Each structure stands twice: as structure tokens, then as C-alpha cells.
Image: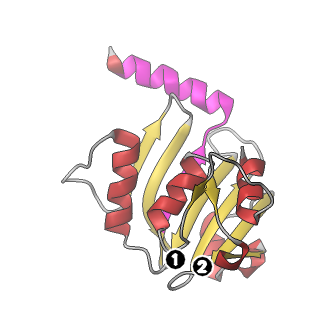
Amino acid sequence: MLSFLAAILAGSVQASAATDVLPSDFSGLFQATCLDGQARLRANEVTPISFDQLPAGLRDELGHPASAKIWQLNAAGRSYLYLLEYQVAPGASPKICGLASDAMDLRTAGDALERRVTGSVSRDRLQSTQWLNAKDGYVAMATTAARFNVLQISWMSDADRAAALVQTEALAH
């Protein structure tokens, strides 16, 4: 799925199901890319960059991926869309898709993400929050990192997904 997302973002794939999204619609772009795999941006709306070109603080927060596809968005502030792959290790997410921006309103974007993954918005939600979806195998989060507001999906390994399903089923009983 990540290679399809990268191709869409690079403008090399035209899929009828792809969604045109403005780079300034941070929440919509994040959801269309990271949850739906159907974002379509024009070449003048994004600039591919290397992992080393990210701001140092954000780069430090993201660790050491084995591979990275990153686009700087031609939008307000400093805004980046990223697809990262890490070495497989127990408890570590092998694939991450996220959007980091110093211009994104985290409360509004977090509300939109929460509505998408849970169906509603909690009035008591902390600004920095995670939602586990064991069935689909990911953790969604709205948080901050190095002066950036971040929306991110961390995909679970098959083993971690199976363990999360067992735990969530045990809680339901």
C-alpha cells in the first residue's frame, strides 16, 4: 500500500478512486493518504525531500527509518507528509504514515481524526491522544513533536496485531 501512496503523491499514478486534496487541508490530506491510500496532489503542491532535510527536532522524533519518502507541502508554515519504514522488531511499528506541520491546528485535526476512527469526538479528550484499531492493525495519533503538530498512523506488525486482537477480545468479555 505504501508504494501505491508514494506513486499517487509523486503524480505518477492516476486512479479513478483517488481523491484530490489541497495541501492546506491537513486533516483531509492525512486521512486521504494514510487511511484511504487515495490522495492525489499535483507536482506543484509538494516537493519531495530526503529524511535528512527534515528539521532536526522532527527528524530526531521519528528515529532511524530503514527507508523514507517525504514531501514538503506547499502550504502554510513548515508542513511535511511522510511514509516511513522501519526494521521489524517486536512492539515497533514497521510502517508509519504521518503529517507534521507547525501551521496545523491540532485540536481541529485531532477532532477530525477521532471522528474518523471512532465515529464521535470526546469532549474530554486530551490534545495529545492515541486510538488503537486492533482489527485493522494500526494506532492513530494526534500529538506534538519538536514544535510540530502531528497526525500519524503507525501500522502494527502481524504478530503485534494478533496480540492486540487477543487483548482487546479479552477486554470485551
Q: Which residues are magenta?
A: 150-171
Would you place residue 169 above or below residue 8 in this image? above
Horizontally, residue 124 falls left or right of residue 58, namely: left
Q: Position of residue 40 (x, y in %)?
A: 64, 60
- Seen from the viewer's position, the closer of residues 97 and 43 is 43
Query: Going by the picture, which residue comes out furthest to the left?
Result: 123
Element on which disc 1 rests: loop
Q: Pick whichever of labels 1 and 2 is earlier in the sequence.
A: 2
Residue 78: mark in rendering:
none
Element on which disc 2 rests: helix
Q: From the image, tell me which residue sits under label 2.
A: 57
- Seen from the viewer's position, the closer of residues 81 and 140 is 81
- Measuring 26% from the left and 54% from the top, which residue is drawn there? 125
Residue 146: mark in rendering:
1
- Seen from the viewer's position, the closer of residues 20 and 96 is 20
Three-letter amino acid code at disc 2? Gly
49 magenta-colored: no
Q: Position of residue 113 (x, y in %)?
A: 40, 53
